[in-house]
Image (cartoon, helix red, strand yellow):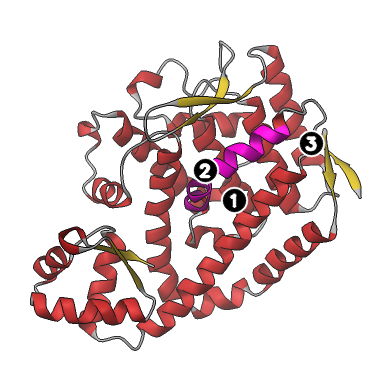
Amino acid sequence: MENSVFDFKIDLDWKLIRTISQIDRFDASWTTIERRESQSLKQLKSIATVRSVGASTRIEGSKMSDEEVNILLQELDITKLEDRDSQEVVGYFEAFDIISESFNEIPITENSLKNLHNILLKYSKKDGWHKGNYKQPSSAVEANYPDGTKQIVFQTTEAGFATEDAMRNLINWYENDSETHPLVKCSIFTYEFLSIHPFQDGNGRLSRLISTLLLLKKGYNWIKYVSFEHEIENRKPEYYKVLRSCQIQRPNENVSDWVNFFFDALKNIQEQLMQKLEQNGVEIQLSPKEKSIITFIGNNAGCKSGEIAKKLGIPSPTIKRLLPDLIEKNLIEKHGIGPGTNYSIK
């Protein structure tokens, strides 16, 4: 059954309804889970933050690994942010942290979004002329690939009055629509923001921050403990493909493919969160050495056994004996073979 929401058409079928129900059933039980798992969630939030910052900036072309992001944030010195990747990582972290800690105090207004954009690009020296302000020349959405190539995904709203009117229209709808399900509203706001592309740069990163902000404001607090951005990074070709398939229908397009993609991403990260909480239940039974190894790998993705042994002061034979057990318990992952073998959190 085709329905109209905002300026779009959406197929309200049983698949969509089932997915919404599944996400909301999880959310209904979250308060109890959060209270029971408070200690585990502190560690998960720290890991999720690093993964979110790393993934969202890599989607836009950064080459920093999660391990490099973690080291940068732990040893942060804003006077030494010389390269663009580092500048973008720290800006994203600060915007993400503000949203995570103060989402209730951030209204959905043009000024708030411009302020978040200003924070996002705070350390990006080349972006000083446009941060916090809507774009001047018109721009297109481009996909950045690891080999340095770019591909235009779709054209965006014209700069000037067209962008200003489009943003005002979107925010007015979001604030005044009391009939559309909150999850549908979050997904459509993100899609239309990307379509308008109101700023000269940083729109992709800001769209993912906005998704988190909207979900938190609607009470989906579990989003803080798992990385939505990492899920998008893992599905980057699909992400751009779905955006393009909806965009070519503008105006008044059917956005069902986008909404289903958005919801499927949320459903996947819910499942990932529950798996991690179950793993933490197993971790309670671990020895102190095993727990220290898990913590170190969580904070240093891509580390090797020799590095783990050296940093933790545990004999190398002991590390090599314990690592297979942790893999068997589905707590860590092994990557590569021989001298290149490294480990990350499952």
Q: Secondary structure at mark 1?
A: helix
Q: Which picture quadrant has residue 257?
A: top right
The circle drawn on residue 144 is none
Q: Work out whether mark 1 precedes mark 3 in sequence or the reverse, and give the earlier one.
A: 1
> Which quadrant of the figure contains the C terminus?
bottom left
The circle drawn on residue 236 is 2
3D distance between C-alphas at marks 1 and 3: 19 Å
Q: Residue 287 at what x, y percent from top left?
A: 25, 86
The residue to which callout 1 is attached is: 104
Mark 2 packing: few (<14 Cα in 10 Å), some, or many (20+)? some
Amino acid type of the residue tagged 1 in the rendering:
Asn
Mark 3 packing: few (<14 Cα in 10 Å), some, or many (20+)? some
Q: Work out whether mark 2 precedes mark 3 in sequence or the reverse, and give the earlier one.
A: 3
Amino acid type of the residue tagged 2 in the rendering:
Lys
Select label 1 or label 3 by which is in front.
3
Q: Is residue 243 above or below residue 159?
A: below
At x 63% / y 62%, what residue is drawn? 267
Amino acid type of the residue tagged 3 in the rendering:
Trp
